[in-house]
């Protein structure tokens, strides 16, 4: 898992894993979210195989070049070693494709729809969708929900904003040319960086541009403007992932499935 011990999403998920254990041991494997993600993830995969682990919880690598190929290789190596995988939060395949591995996460398409619908109900008509380059399939699913909400309100203009939040000039150009009155952000981190830069440009939030995001991390309430955000039930996801893994170890031939929740405000 990326940023294990530092983040507010995977840390409570992993704590819930540990809380559900009775007769097993949990090995912690952290992959930092940086350019070396893919090398360290594959090295960790080889290490876990060498330890003959019973199963692996895997949050696929994101925001790094060739992430899809890396995730597929890791999945293939674990499968070749006959080690069951429970994917956490996201799939190793691009949305809307699904791998054959068990997956525990939220209904990301519905989450994207709800975020977008919230802004539409508050009178917004020029809605942008902001996301990081190289984002995970969860973001693609949220963007699909964003598109569906626009379509249902007969709004034809999609306003995609691919940004890491660092290029203030690019954000200024986007605001000037696209003229958004609101932004659906792929996650709270994207929203936080974008908010600071919009305020730096003299754009008032929420008077000029409204924002909504997802994850409900702790710092969201301490931003210059408190962030409207969907809450991910991380403890429930972690407990469910452990339950799925233990069931998989008992019945390796059962059909793989997906457990999902709808995030709440």
Image (cartoon, grey):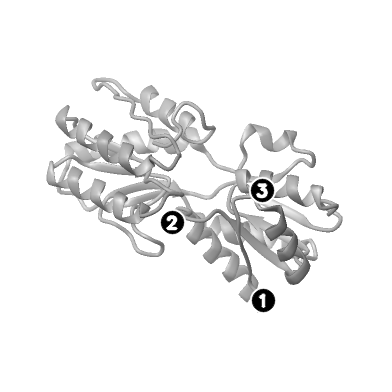
Quarter of the rendering occupied by the C terminus = top right
- Asked if residue 115 lies left or right of residue 40, the reply is right
> Residue 263 in the image: x percent, y percent?
56, 47
- Asked if residue 21 lies left or right of residue 81, the reply is right
Count of marks placed on residues: 3
> Residue 116 in the image: x percent, y percent?
66, 61
Report the residue at 57% width, 70% height from top: 148
Report the residue at 71% width, 53% height from top: 168
Q: Residues within 10 Å of mark 2 (few under 14, many from 20)?
A: many
Mark seen at residue 137? 2
- Asked if residue 24 lies left or right of residue 144, the reply is left
> Residue 169 in the image: x percent, y percent?
72, 57
- Closest to the observer, 47 or 94: 47
> Residue 142 in the image: x percent, y percent?
54, 59
Mark seen at residue 209? none
Task: Identify the secondary structure beneath mark 1.
Answer: loop
Residue matched to label 3: 191
Residue matched to label 1: 157
Q: CA distance from mark 2 to mark 3?
A: 18 Å
- Closest to the observer, 161 or 22: 161
């Amino acid at each position: 898992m990326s940023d294990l011990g530092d983040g507010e999403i995977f840390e409570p998920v992993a704590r819930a894993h540990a809380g559900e254990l009775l007769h097993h041991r949990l090995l912690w494997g952290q992959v930092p979210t940086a350019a070396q993600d893919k090398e360290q993830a594959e090295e960790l995969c080889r290490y876990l195989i060498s330890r003959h682990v019973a199963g692996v919880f895997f949050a696929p690598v994101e925001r790094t070049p060739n992430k899809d190929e890396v995730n597929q290789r890791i999945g293939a190596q674990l499968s070749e070693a006959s080690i069951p995988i429970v994917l956490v939060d996201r799939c190793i395949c691009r949305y809307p494709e699904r791998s054959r591995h068990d997956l525990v996460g939220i209904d990301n398409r519905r989450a994207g729809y709800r975020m977008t619908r919230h802004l539409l109900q508050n009178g917004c008509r020029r809605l942008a969708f902001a996301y990081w380059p190289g984002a995970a399939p969860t973001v693609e699913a949220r963007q699909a929900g964003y598109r569906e909400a626009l379509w249902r309100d007969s709004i034809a203009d999609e306003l995609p904003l691919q940004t890491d939040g660092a290029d203030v000039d690019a954000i200024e150009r986007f605001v000037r040319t696209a003229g958004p009155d609101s932004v659906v952000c792929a996650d709270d981190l994207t929203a936080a960086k974008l908010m600071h830069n919009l305020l730096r440009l003299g754009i008032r939030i929420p008077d000029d541009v409204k924002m909504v995001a997802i994850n409900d991390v702790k710092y969201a309430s301490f931003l210059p403007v408190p962030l409207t955000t969907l809450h991910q039930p991380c403890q429930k996801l972690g407990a469910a992932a452990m339950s799925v893994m233990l069931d998989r170890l008992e019945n390796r031939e059962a059909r793989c499935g997906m457990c999902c929740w709808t995030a709440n405000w």
